[in-house]
Image (spheres, rainbow, N blue to C red):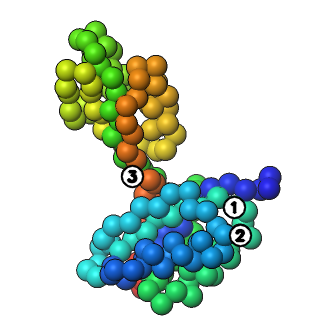
Amino acid sequence: MANEHNHIISTIVEHKPGVLYTVANLFRRRNFNIENISVGPAEEVGLARMTITVRGDDRTIEQVVKQLNKLIDVIKVTRLDPDHIVTRELALIKVNAPNPKVRSDLINYADIFRARVVDVSSESLMVEITGTSDKVDAFIDIMKPFGVKEVARTGITALSRGAKSAKMEE
């Protein structure tokens, strides 16, 4: 559909075994595709935050939110406003670096992107980069001519800007 775009949903859930499976299974049953998902402990003990990116139109996303709210282990579901959030992603990229000239070029590119070299071997270099997904994509594109050996990405994590919060009491 022409109206489809990525939506970011922040979900506070019980931090216990099986919750991720239950959420992923809901998406599978409803034939929704998760573009990416990141999960980690939340600010309150016993809870976790899932940041889920879903592609779809507004009606589809409303259905996703309604279905998530019906799950027992889900405490709160918030659709994040793309104009009022901060998003970040972390990636590790291993690139061919067969000689000092190539390593020097890679280090220069890393500096331009405010990335960090986290491992160097005689044949490769590993770079850590954080930023928006577009920034990570751009850095990977610049690395491709050098020969990208491996990429590991965390997926997007996001929070609302300012005082607004997805905490339970709100």
Q: Which mark is residue 56?
A: 1
Quadrant location, the N terminus: bottom right
**Cα–Cα gap, marks 1 and 2:** 6 Å
Q: Nearer the viewer, residue 1 or 124?
A: 124
Q: Confirm or deny contact between disc 1 and disc 2 (CB under 8 A).
A: yes
The amino acid pointed to by label 1 is: Gly
Locate residue 160, reporting x and y percent: 47, 63
Position in image of residue 36 (x %, y %)? 50, 57
The residue tagged 3 is 154
Could one spot residue 67 in this view of the protein?
Answer: yes
Q: Amino acid at mark 2?
A: Thr
| Residue 65 seen from this side | no
- Residue 83 lies, with reference to residue 132, above or below; the image says below
Q: Secondary structure at mark 2?
A: helix
Write down the residue under mark 2. Answer: 60
Q: Nearer the viewer, residue 111 or 86?
A: 111
Question: Real-space Cα distance between discs 2 and 3?
Answer: 25 Å
Position in image of residue 157 (x %, y %): 43, 57
Task: Say which quarter of the image contains residue 126.
Answer: top left
